[in-house]
């Protein structure tokens, strides 16, 4: 038990004990050469950082440090048995201003909650930091990197504060920092992951969930986004004003907030969207002004769009996209033109190969995997809802069925096709490398896709032949017919 005698001597017994314990460390550190390893407990962390020489390694074995840490010289901090740094709801937990700093194996918790001061778990303002295998809990901002080229964020779990989504901070923010690697991190309950004004970023194997924008890119050229899970956000990823971005092999699913886009593309040039799974979003992919430059091309291929309200929504001004070898399976609407009209100057078949459409009514006579007649997207429903989105209220009503029947039966009311795919596929290609939804076995996505269809078919089969109403048996006291 610690006895407080501060009224008599102005210090606590606890501080005296810690001070004596550090006496040896301070005297040792003053004579140690750079690159030495110092072993301490978490309570001694601030004093050890102050005493260490640039290039030293500080191993912290368990314990709790209460307060904020500033690392202003190149150091390596290694946490053993997950020591805790608790900011006690005040300010940023660790601020790094020196290059080549490593922080590994700590639990950071309880940052401040002031947006104006951007209270964070980590604030990194120097190049070549390595932030690895840390738990960052109950923080406003998670890891904020500014003017920190070459930084690596790997294997961290970042959990935001319990606030309204617009009041939260960004759990990962990269600003003016080129060549940053963000790998195998998990962010939960943040606002966005913001990546702005940075080139050659790589995001690989991360999970962004329960936020507003899973990823929010602006003015980032040559980015690689691969193998990530973007789930249960309002928007999975919104990608703006960049060049040569590659979005490949990602799971983009269950994004159904007010916007509900799996991804949004705004003025993106020479982008490649390939090998992704777009599952159960309000809109799988929203395309606005992409590509922007007249000499640029967008490529959307080898993706799966399944069970979205709308697989792809595009503005009528969108041009110069090559859209091939994708599977469009049981989306409520396959393609919608926002505001109505017709898509011009986009290629829906490239090299004699188009896309798979689950509502294709054609046939494959020569068994070459291609339909013998073109796929024409000319549903009156899609044309009407493109101009008046509020008509989705009647999506499953008999009125819509009647309008579609009339459009097929009477050419006078048949709409112009939104698009024509001259070489539709008759077998759906499936992405091989994108992550699967949780609980789905590797290599077996068909149960996820076919289960709703199977349940509907079972319901229909169970009710075929059954009378809708059944006359009751005559009651013993009822008169017989003819009496």
Image (cartoon, rainbow, N blue to C red):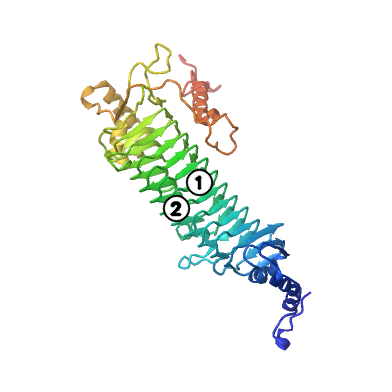
Residue 428, given in percent of the width and then of the height, sits at 46, 24
277 relative to 179, above or below: above
**Dot 2 alpha-carbon crowd within 10 angstroms: few under 14, some 14 to 19, many 20 or more:** many
- Residue lying at the far top in this picture: please name it: 366
190 relative to 94, above or below: above
- Residue lying at the far right in this picture: please name it: 1
Q: Is residue 39 visible?
A: yes
Circle on res. 388: none
Residue hosting label 1: 203
For the residues labelled 1 and 2, say whether their Cβ atoms are less than 8 Å apart: yes
Q: Is residue 308 visible?
A: no
Q: Nearer the viewer, residue 482 or 66?
A: 66
Circle on res. 195: 2
294 relative to 21, above or below: above
Residue 191, given in percent of the width and then of the height, sits at 47, 55
Residue 74, given in percent of the width and then of the height, sits at 59, 63
């Amino acid at each position: 038990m610690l006895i407080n005698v501060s009224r008599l001597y102005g210090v606590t017994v606890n501080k005296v004990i810690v001070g004596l314990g550090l006496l040896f460390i301070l005297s040792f550190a003053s004579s140690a050469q750079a690159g030495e390893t110092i072993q301490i407990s978490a309570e001694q962390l601030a004093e050890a950082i102050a005493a260490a020489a640039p290039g030293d390694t500080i191993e912290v074995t368990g314990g709790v440090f209460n307060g904020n840490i500033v690392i202003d010289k190149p150091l390596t901090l290694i946490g053993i048995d997950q020591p805790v740094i608790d900011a006690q709801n005040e300010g940023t937990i660790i601020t790094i201003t020196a290059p080549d700093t490593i922080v590994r194996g700590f639990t950071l918790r309880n940052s401040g909650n002031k947006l104006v001061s951007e209270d964070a778990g980590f604030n990194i303002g120097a190049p070549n930091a390595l932030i690895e295998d840390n738990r960052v809990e109950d923080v406003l901002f998670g890891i904020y990197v500014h003017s920190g080229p070459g930084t690596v964020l790997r294997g961290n779990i970042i959990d935001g504060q319990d606030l309204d989504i617009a009041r939260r901070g960004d759990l990962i923010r990269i600003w003016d920092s080129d060549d940053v690697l963000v790998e195998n991190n998990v962010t939960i309950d943040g606002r966005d992951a913001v990546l702005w004004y940075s080139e050659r970023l790589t995001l690989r194997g991360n999970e962004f969930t329960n936020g507003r924008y899973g990823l929010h890119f602006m003015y980032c050229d040559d980015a690689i986004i691969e193998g990530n899970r973007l789930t249960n956000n309002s928007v999975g990823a919104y990608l703006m004003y960049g060049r040569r971005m590659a979005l490949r092999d990602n799971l983009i699913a269950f994004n159904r907030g007010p916007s509900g886009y799996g991804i949004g593309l705004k003025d993106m040039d020479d982008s490649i969207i390939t090998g992704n799974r777009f599952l159960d979003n309000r809109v799988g992919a929203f395309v606005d002004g992409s590509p922007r430059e007249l000499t640029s091309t967008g490529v959307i291929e080898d993706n799966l769009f399944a069970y979205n309200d709308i697989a792809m929504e595009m503005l009528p001004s969108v041009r110069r996209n090559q859209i091939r070898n994708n599977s469009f399976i049981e989306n409520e609407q396959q393609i919608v033109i926002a505001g109505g009209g017709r898509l011009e100057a986009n290629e829906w078949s490239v090299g004699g190969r188009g896309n798979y459409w689950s509502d294709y009514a054609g046939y494959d006579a020569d068994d070459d995997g291609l339909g013998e007649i073109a796929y024409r997207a000319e549903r009156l429903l899609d044309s009407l809802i493109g101009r008046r989105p509020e008509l989705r209220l009647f999506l499953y009503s008999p009125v819509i069925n009647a309008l579609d029947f009339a459009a097929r039966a009477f050419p006078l009311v048949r709409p112009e096709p939104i698009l024509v795919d001259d070489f539709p596929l008759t077998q759906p290609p499936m992405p091989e490398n994108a992550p699967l939804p949780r609980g789905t076995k590797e290599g077996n996505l068909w149960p996820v896709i076919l289960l709703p269809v199977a349940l509907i078919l079972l319901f229909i089969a169970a009710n075929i032949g059954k009378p809708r109403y059944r006359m009751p048996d005559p009651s013993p006291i009822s008169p017989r017919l003819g009496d």
